[in-house]
Amino acid sequence: MGKKDVVIAAYYETKYARRSGRSVYDFAGEAASGVLQNAGLKKEDIDGLAVLTSFSGANEPFWSVRVCEALALSPRWLQMVDVGGASAVVAVARAAEAIRDKRAETVMILGVDSPTTEWNTVYKGYRAEFEEPYGPMGPPGLFALFQRRVMKELGITLEHLGKIAITQRNHARLNPNALLRDEMTMESYINSRMVSDPLRLFDSVMFCDGGGALIVTTAENAETITDKPVYILGWGEYHNFNGSDPLPDVTQTGFQLATPPALKEADVKIDDIKTFQPYDDFTVAVAMQLAECGFTSREELPKYIENTDFSITGDLPLNTGGGQLSVGQPGLASGMVNLIEGVRQLRGEAGERQVKDANPTLVTGLGVVTLARHWHSNIVMVLGV
Amino acid sequence: MGRPVPKPTNITKPFWEATRQNKLVIQYCKDCGTYTWYPRPVCMKCMSRNLEWKEVSGKGKVYSYTITHIAPKGFEDQVPYIVASIDLDEGVRILSNIVDCKPDEVEIGMRVEVIFEDLSEDMKLPVFKPSK
Ligand SMILES: [Zn+2]
């Protein structure tokens, strides 16, 4: 495999809750303190801090500074990451870059949000003039446009999307921290409330409060932290795919360009990947990533979904903690759900839902819904032990 | 409809001034001949600022659509209504509503044309209806 010089050495995940009544800073404190404790580090050991954007706290110009100050940290490297749901995995990439460039040695990555308690976001740019006057139901409304086009062009059906939702729900039933654990059947999936036809309630995530933190450091430093380092083997990212095309084919995404460099850097092939933790704000995003990351071709995607066992004991265990679709989506800390589950599986700490051989794993992030397209930012990362 | 009323910027003002006269105008690049949507500070193809507002036909076809059943604030009493992405014949995709059309009659590829709906006393919003 690829480089083994930078690792994820520790993680902490908060409990998720709806309307927790807790400030985003309270979650920041819990996650920061928790990850330090899990790593056995003192706060003076942290010389880098990456803070994910948030709906609750990032509506001011100095968000990462406020968090840094609140935690009374004094790093020599500080970064805010604001590429929406892609921010968690992008933050790991930024931390690894900084560590390789010797700008920091031990970076804390902090992703917390409290959108069901404190919603403080005002969207700028084109939205108020060229989107909101038409009344799409937020991201689900815009993803519904994407879903319809994918269904038509690639032959994806409700049964394909339902299989993804049900598989992940089955995994969530083994995850005590998942908020949605009731049994889901194909019937209950198809009959779930219509939000924005063809997109249903069970195609979509539910907001919650919470998040988590990671410690990214050198392999050398990690020796004193853990005997289970998770190596950051490679990644690729791409932003605003087809951004200069006024009539883009929305069934093509930046994952096509983000995945090959990730696999190459990690020196693995897509068939070597043992577990897949794709960003899952909507079922159609998961379906598309199966093709766009190269597990199958566009043409064979429907058959591939039908014939592949995505369960914990199956061919390609998928979002083994239930993903955001069943855990809940902690605002813009969302990507931490998939990322932390990837790390947990590689460390063999997933309890009842532990996959026998999870290594290596592919974790992805996608971020920010764009006008009549799909999403802006794409990142693919290979993690291994 | 309880549509929010946009506040134009110096970039978007010519667009909203044109809709007031029932005209649909789109930014056109005099250097490379590309139409850009939504209104931007530069041409989306070549980053030129040599842009002009050109009146377009207002005709196009449905690229994708959704029927809104759960609506955002202000739109609740309109459900079910159609939100669509529409490819104008001039070559840009815009988000809009399709009106004068039953939800079960809209389909991908359907021809549509622009009409203008009053937003406020001095603003109009381009929406689309099925072409005859
Ligand atoms: Zn141009």
Image (cartoon, coloured by chain):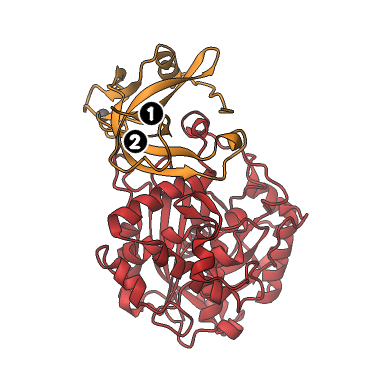
Checking the image for residue B128, the label placed there is 1
Q: Secondary structure at mark 1?
A: strand
Checking the image for residue B86, the label placed there is 2
In three-dimensional space, the C-alpha distance between marks 2 and 1, rounded to whole angstroms, equals 9 Å
Looking at the image, residue A214 lies above or below residue B41: below
Position of residue A85 measured from the top left corner of the image (x, y, whole percent): 51, 55
Checking the image for residue A182, the label placed there is none
Mark 2 and mark 1 residues within 8 Å of each other at the beta carbon? yes
Look at the image and give the colour of chain A.
Answer: red
Out of B77 and A325, give the one closest to the viewer.
B77
Position of residue A162 measured from the top left corner of the image (x, y, whole percent): 46, 66
Looking at the image, residue B94 lies above or below residue A79: above
Going by the numbered disc 2, the residue's amino acid type is Ile
Label 2 marks a residue whose chain is: B
Looking at the image, residue A380 lies above or below residue A252: below
Dividing the image into four equal quarters, which quarter contains ligand 1? top left
Q: Secondary structure at mark 2?
A: strand
The residue carrying mark 1 has its beta carbon less than 8 Å from ligand 1 = no
Which chain is orange in the rendering? B
Going by the numbered disc 1, the residue's amino acid type is Phe
Question: Position of B120 compared to A315: left or right?
Answer: right
Residue in the image at 59% along x and 28% along y:
B2
Residue in the image at 63% along x and 47% along y:
A55
Position of residue A130 measured from the top left corner of the image (x, y, whole percent): 46, 31
Q: Residues within 10 Å of mark 2 (few under 14, many from 20)?
A: many
